[in-house]
Image (cartoon, rainbow, N blue to C red):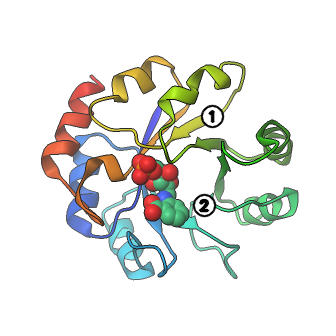
Amino acid sequence: MKIKICGITNIEDALLAHKLGADLLGVILDNNVKRHGTRELIDEMKSYNLNVVGVYTSMPESIEDDFVQLHFPHGYKEILDVKSTGASVISVIDMNSEQYDKKYHEYINAGSDFILFEDRSGIIKRLPELLNYKKIGIAGKISPENVSIASSFNPELIDASSGLELYTGKKSPERLKMFFEALK
Ligand SMILES: O=C(O)c1ccccc1NCC(=O)[C@H](O)[C@H](O)COP(=O)(O)O
């Protein structure tokens, strides 16, 4: 099971999350999103050998990342285009969208490395719906208080962001520590 901390906006949060045990660190590359980062931040994170996921809300013109999160409704072509660069793909499915099961099979068949099921109002209550899926990640209000429930479900990927913040865009060192403690 891999742990991804998303919404990283600064190097201090990135280094602390990595030190505590994060496998992947997500940087949102969309200036319209409050908790976004920059290409410069990604370069700095890579200089520390951190595993960075570039999180995109639309298809980027070029791919410079080792891990790419397609955080918008996409299809076969976008996944193949990213995979042709050698990057790993995280395909996000909004569980409140129609036909999420159909999308899951499309993304699996296209070769996505992880299918990240997201319910921004809280994924924990949706877990019973996900029992028969493979290669899945889960996201949506995962926090120190409920991450033990998330991990007992044993997904391939757990993604957490806002539940670890002091304020939007800034992670709380205390909450990060509590989160990784709860995973032990
Ligand atoms: O976090 C955002 O505001 C965001 C906005 C637009 C696209 C992606 C965004 N986040 C990426 C993520 O993977 C989230 O961090 C993930 O769904 C977890 O969300 P949460 O823990 O509920 O903040």
Question: Which of the pair 62/125 is nearer the observer?
Answer: 125
Is residue 5 something one can see in this rendering? Answer: no
Q: Is residue 119 visible?
A: yes
Q: Residue at x 23, y 41 (%)?
A: 20
Position of the C terminus, as image quadrant, is top left
- Establish if 119 lies above or below 85: above
Please, is residue 131 above or below residue 108 in the view? Answer: above
Residue 57: % across, % down? 61, 69
| Mark in the foreground, 1 or 2 | 1
User: Residue drawn at (85%, 40%), measured in percent from left and top?
Assistant: 102
SS at badge 2: strand
Q: Work out whether residue 134 or residue 119 is closer to the camera in this orientation and state it.
A: 119
Q: Which residue is mark 1?
A: 136
Q: Amino acid at mark 2?
A: Val
| Mark earlier in primary sequence (1, 2) | 2
Quadrant position of residue 22: top left
From the top left corner, tell me how far across and down residue 175 is, in percent: 19, 43
The residue identified by callout 2 is: 68
Image quadrant assignment for residue 160: top left
- Labels 1 and 2 touching (C-beta < 8 A): no
In this picture, residue 109 sits left or right of residue 124: right
For badge 1, the amino acid type reads Ile
Q: Residue at x 35, y 63 (%)?
A: 8
Count of numbered badges drawn on the protein: 2
Q: Position of residue 146 (x, y in %)?
A: 34, 28
